[in-house]
Image (tube, rainbow, N blue to C red):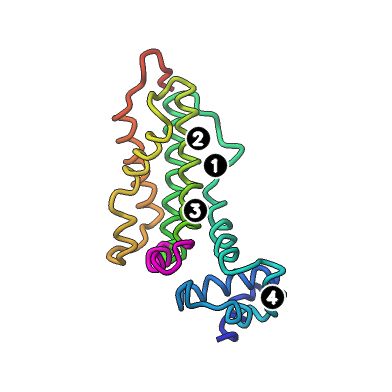
Amino acid sequence: MASSTSQADEEGGEELPARARILAAAMAAFMENGYAATSTLEIATRARVSKRELYALVGNKQEMLIASISRRAKRLDLPAEAPAVSDRESLTNALVSYGTKLVREVSDPGVIAVFRLAIAEAAQAPEVAQAFQTMGREASRAALRTIMARAQAAGLLTGRPAELAEQFAGLLWGDLIINLLLGVTERPSARAIAQRTREATAAFLRLHPSPDGAPAG
């Protein structure tokens, strides 16, 4: 078991640092055995570290889970250099750009596996779902709320940013996330993701036409 992890943890012939090995080993064990049934000893064995080193570098199982989810969630942050939302064209571009990124990241098989883990462990280990909700889903929601708030400040949209963000997310995902979780559909291609995002953006903007006097771009 440890040997396969060792091979997976090598990139270009160089072994990953101990902390990265621990996080990779933890997620692999969680997926295979379930969160509740995985011991820190197994994780340490897979990562080829002592339990003392494991606790010093990462912490307990919950801290390993949070660290792993947080690392992935950072990819969903809105870039600091994101263009300003000043007219309908720039709003369209912002929604298409972020929506494409969101679907690409969340439809990744590794992320879908974490979704399934959170569902499977909901009764025995509710902290898995809580960590995923807080660290994972909130990252995308916060980014969408920021886009909507900027559009509202520019006079392009009316309504509460949180509600606008949820509405856009609903249009973007439809039944896709459920179908991915059930395994009844494949991860969409880059072209399909781009088309899905453009259609969701167009539908959202049709529901929210420009307020009087708003620049059209």
Disc 3 or 1, which lies upstream in sequence? 1
User: Does the CB distance between marks 3 and 1 fall below 8 Å?
Assistant: no
SS assignment at label 2: helix
Q: How far apart, in angstroms, are the residues tagged by discs 4 and 1?
A: 31 Å
**What residue is disc 1 on?**
78
Mark 3 Cα shell of 10 Å, populated few (<14), some (14-19), many (≥20):
many
Q: Quadrant of residue 63?
A: bottom right
Part of the protein shown in magenta:
115-128
**What residue is disc 2 on?**
146
Q: Nearer the viewer, residue 181 or 213?
A: 181
User: Does the CB distance between marks 1 and 2 fall below 8 Å?
Assistant: yes
x then y, percent, for residue 102: 45, 49
Disc marking residue 129: none
User: Does the CB distance between marks 2 and 4 fall below 8 Å?
Assistant: no
**What residue is disc 3 on?**
136
x then y, percent, for residue 78: 54, 42
**What residue is disc 4 on?**
15
Q: How far apart, in angstroms, are the residues tagged by discs 2 and 4?
A: 39 Å
Disc 3 or 4, which lies upstream in sequence? 4
